[in-house]
Image (cartoon, rainbow, N blue to C red):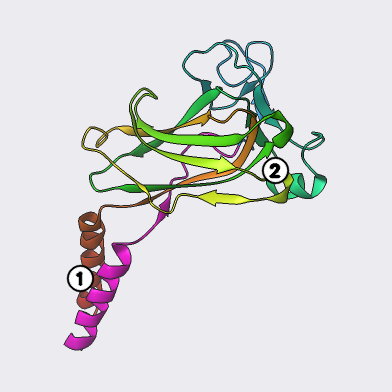
């Protein structure tokens, strides 16, 4: 039995040290909460268009050049796409906006960003820069930059395979994501997820706690 417990402990610690947790506390990160008409306007095409729930323009709360969120009925989204994914966002070159989570950044955290994206090729080149920050979008601690060459309804996924590690300054802060259109054209984005591989020591302690409970139940 001791050998089994030791083997379980080693396996569990190896597994939890690489556990990936999707952070689900971002506000409207997939745009499916839609838009609302309210004042003051904060996100995307405001003040002359509806506000994108949970999002704030950057660096100011003034209107962006050409950005927004659209869903079923939009000329650039097929019914097959919106039946599954509902709404999607778009931004022109130089536009930027951000949203916050309630996640508190821990020492040793490594974050991974994934999304579906496209570009209207006739408007120019496509590129998204997705930056993670703590407390305020001026406090960026890492970015994932991706050239976009696909057409949005085709459902092309992009993901960061390297990861963005939490910096010492970010630890204890609240996690946010800042999206910037950094190509020359108009790009689209949807189904954004931010995942974290938690600091191994913390996860190992959780694994040991589980093991202790198993031993107690013997």
Q: Secondary structure at mark 1?
A: helix
Q: Quadrant of residue 104?
A: top left
Q: Position of residue 52 (x, y in %)?
A: 61, 25
185 in magenta: no
Give residue 64's position: percent from left, percent from top: 60, 17
The picture places residue 207, in percent across and down from the top left corner, at 25, 65
Q: Is residue 155 above or below residue 65?
A: below
Residue beneath label 2, please? 152
| Disc 2 residue crowd, few under 14, some 14–19, many 20+, Cα 10 Å | many
Task: Quickly name the residue at label 1.
Answer: 212
The quadrant of the image that shows the N terminus is: bottom left
Q: Residue at x 73, y 46 (%)?
A: 153
Residue 25 against residue 8 in the figure, above or below: above
Q: Is residue 157 left or right of residue 202?
A: right
Q: Position of residue 125 (x, y in %)?
A: 62, 34
Sequence-wise first label, 2 or 1: 2
Q: Nearer the viewer, residue 125 or 161?
A: 125
The magenta span reads: 1-30
16 in magenta: yes
Q: Which quadrant: the C terminus? A: bottom left
Q: CA distance from mark 2 to mark 1?
A: 49 Å
- Tag on residue 187? none
Relative to 18, say whether 148 is above or below.
Answer: above
């Amino acid at each position: 039995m001791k050998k089994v417990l030791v083997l379980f402990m080693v396996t569990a610690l190896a597994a939890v040290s690489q556990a990936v947790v999707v952070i689900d506390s971002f506000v409207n990160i997939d745009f499916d909460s839609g838009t609302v008409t309210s004042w003051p306007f904060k996100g995307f095409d405001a003040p002359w268009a509806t506000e994108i729930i949970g999002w704030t323009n950057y660096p100011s709360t003034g209107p962006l050049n050409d950005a927004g969120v659209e869903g079923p009925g939009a000329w650039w989204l097929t019914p097959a796409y919106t039946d599954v994914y509902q709404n999607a966002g778009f931004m022109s070159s130089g536009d930027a906006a951000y949203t916050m989570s309630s996640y508190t950044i821990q020492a040793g955290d490594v974050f991974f960003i994934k999304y579906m994206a496209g570009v209207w090729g006739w408007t120019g080149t496509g590129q998204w820069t997705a930056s993670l920050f703590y407390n305020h979008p001026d406090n960026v601690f890492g970015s994932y930059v991706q050239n976009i060459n696909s057409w949005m309804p085709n459902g092309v996924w992009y993901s960061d395979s390297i990861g963005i590690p939490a910096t010492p300054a970010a630890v204890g802060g609240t996690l946010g994501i800042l999206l910037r259109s950094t190509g020359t054209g108009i790009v689209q984005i949807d189904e954004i997820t931010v995942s974290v591989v938690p600091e191994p020591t913390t996860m190992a302690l959780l694994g040991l706690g589980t093991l202790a409970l198993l031993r107690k139940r013997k």
